[in-house]
Amino acid sequence: MPILDPDYTPPLWLRNGHAQTLWPVLFRPSPKVVFRRKRLDTPDGDFLDLDVLPASENTARRGVAVLSHGLEGNSRRKYMLGMAAALAEDGWDVVARNLRGCSGEPNRVRRMYHMGETEDLHAVILWCLERGYGRIVLVGFSLGGNQLLKYLGEAPERVPPQVCGAAAFSVPCDLVGAARVMDRPACAVYMEYFLRTLRAKMREKAERFPDFPPVHDLGGMHTFAAFDNRFTGPLHGFRSAREYWERSGCLPFLENIRIPVLLVNAADDPFLSSTCYPRDAASRNACLNLEIPEHGGHVGFVTPGSANVYWSEKRTVRFLREVFTADESSRY
C-alpha cells in the first residue's frame, strides 16, 4: 500500500514534536468516560484488569474495540479516554486493557509486561469472543501499538477471523533505534518520567520476591539499556536488553499482517528513530496503511477547539468505519 497522504494540520503554536507530546499531558481536559472494571484471571495465576465502556445508546452497534496503552500508562490516560469516548460514540463497545501492574494494583507474579508480549492481548481477544462479539478491532498507542502490530504479524494464522482491523499510533517499530534516540539529552525528561514509576514497581516486587534482581542502585539508572539489562530482559527470558529489543520490535512482522491496519507515526515524534517509519513494509503489504504526518509528536495530534476530540481519534473512527463497511460487504 502506498504511503497515505496525512490530513493532520496542527495549530501554528504546536508545530514542534516536544510541544505536541507534552501539551495533552499538561493541558488537555480529561475526557469524561465512566468505565466498568472487569477482571480476567490468567493461566499463570495473575490477572488483567479491563475497563469496559458500552457503545452510545443512540448508535448502531458495530462490535468491540480493544484499546492498549503505552509504557507505564493505563486505561485512564487522556489519550485512552479520548479514544474510548470517540469509538463508543461511533457504535463500538470498548475494552480498555490495563497491562500487568498498571491498573492501580500490583500484579501477582514476578513478570510484568514488555514491548513484545502478545499473549495477554490474545487472552483479551478470546475474552471478547466468549462474550459473543462477531467483530473485533484493535487500537494501540506506542508500546501498546507495537504489541498489537507484532501480534497480528508474528502468527497471523492464530488471529481469530473476528479481528477485522486495527489502528496504531506513535509506534517504536524498531526498538534498537528508538532506544538510541531515547538516550539523547533531549529525551532525559521523558526517561525520568518513565523510570520514576518503573523504579517504584521494581522496589515493590523486590520486597515480595526474594530472587528478584537487585534494586539497591535503581536511582542511578537513567537509560532503557541499564533498566532492560537488569530487569526487563531477565524477567522475561531475554539474555540482554539488546536481545529483548531485537526480538520484540514489530518491524520484522509487519509484512505478514493480513487485516487492514492504520499505522500513524508523526515525522517529528521525539521518541522515534528513522528506522521506525516502515515505508518498505508498507509498500509491500497492501494491508498496511502508513501515514506520516509532518507534526504530531508522540501520542499528540492535538486538535484544539474541537469538543476535546483529537485528530487521532477522528482518524481512527474514519478508518474503522471503512473497515466495518468492507467487512460488512464481505459477509453478504
Image (spheres, helix red, strand yellow):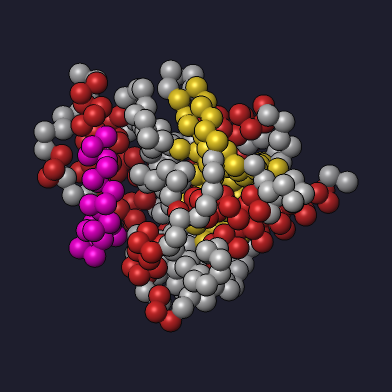
On screen, 240 above or below 303? above
Q: Position of residue 76 (x, y in %)?
A: 45, 46
Main SS, magenta region, reads: helix
Residue 213, by quadrant, is top left
Residue 158 in view here: no
Extreme bottom residue here? 12
Which residue is at the front of the view, 250 or 131?
A: 131
Magenta residues, start to end: 180-201
Extreme right residue here? 332
Left or right: where does residue 55 sit relative to residue 325?
Answer: left
Residue at 15% in and 39% down: 218
Q: Position of residue 221 (x, y in %)?
A: 16, 45
Q: Position of residue 324 (x, y in %)?
A: 74, 51
Residue at 43% in and 62% down: 28
On screen, 90 above or below 97? below
Residue 322, by quadrant, is bottom right
Which residue is at the front of the view, 278 or 148?
A: 148
Q: Position of residue 124 (x, y in %)?
A: 56, 32
Residue at 62% in and 52% down: 87
Quarter the N terminus occupies = bottom right
Residue at 34% in and 40% down: 244
